[in-house]
Image (cartoon, rainbow, N blue to C red):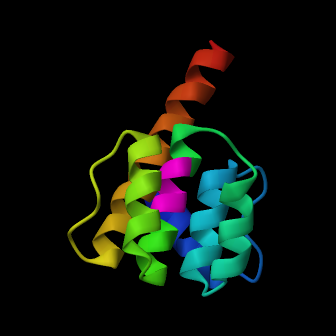
Amino acid sequence: MDYQTFEASLGLAEPPDNLPSPLHALWHQAKGNWDKAHELTQGENSQAAAWVHAFLHRVEGDEANAEYWYGIAGRSQGTGSLSSEWREIAGQLLEAAVESELEMGH
């Protein structure tokens, strides 16, 4: 799935099938369901999930918790707008998902 398709899916009532948990969480956060997004990131131990988890705490305004999760993710704490960081995370995670699918399929 490319970024435009993912972003367009925000107009749907439900997220696309087979989204990796971090992207699923970003989808719910963009739809205003922070609690569902947080629940999805808490149950996964990947750097991608930690990055989304950090972003969610930044959205929440809990900078200390966000800083902790950015460290777990191996990322610098976001300093730009929340919307630009959301786009950056989504774009990078979608790119990684496509690369992973290509490696597995070929």
Question: What residue is shown at x 57% (from left), y 23% (from top)?
Answer: 102
- The picture quadrant where one finds residue 90 is bottom left
Q: Is residue 93 visible?
A: yes
Residue 40: image location, x then y, percent:
72, 60
Relative to 6, residue 60 above or below: below
Q: Residue at x 34, y 76 (%)?
A: 82
Residue at x 74% of width, y 66% of height: 39
What is the chief secondary structure element of the magenta stretch? helix
Q: At which x and y percent is residue 36?
A: 73, 74
Left or right of 56, for residue 34: right
Total number of numbered labels? Answer: 0
Is 30 situated above or below 50? below
Q: Quadrant of residue 30?
A: bottom right
Residue drawn at 71 percent across, 45 percent down: 44
- Tell which residue pokes out farthest to the left in this image: 80
Q: Residue furthest front?
A: 64
Please check the rendered image and state whether residue 87 is part of the magenta-colored stretch, yes or no: no
Q: Residue furthest top?
A: 106
Q: Is residue 3 left or right of residue 38?
A: left
In which image quadrant can residue 17 be found? bottom right
Is residue 51 inside the magenta stretch? yes
Viewport quadrant of the C terminus: top right
| Residue 38 x, y percent position in the rendering | 66, 68
Q: In the image, which residues are magenta?
A: 50-54
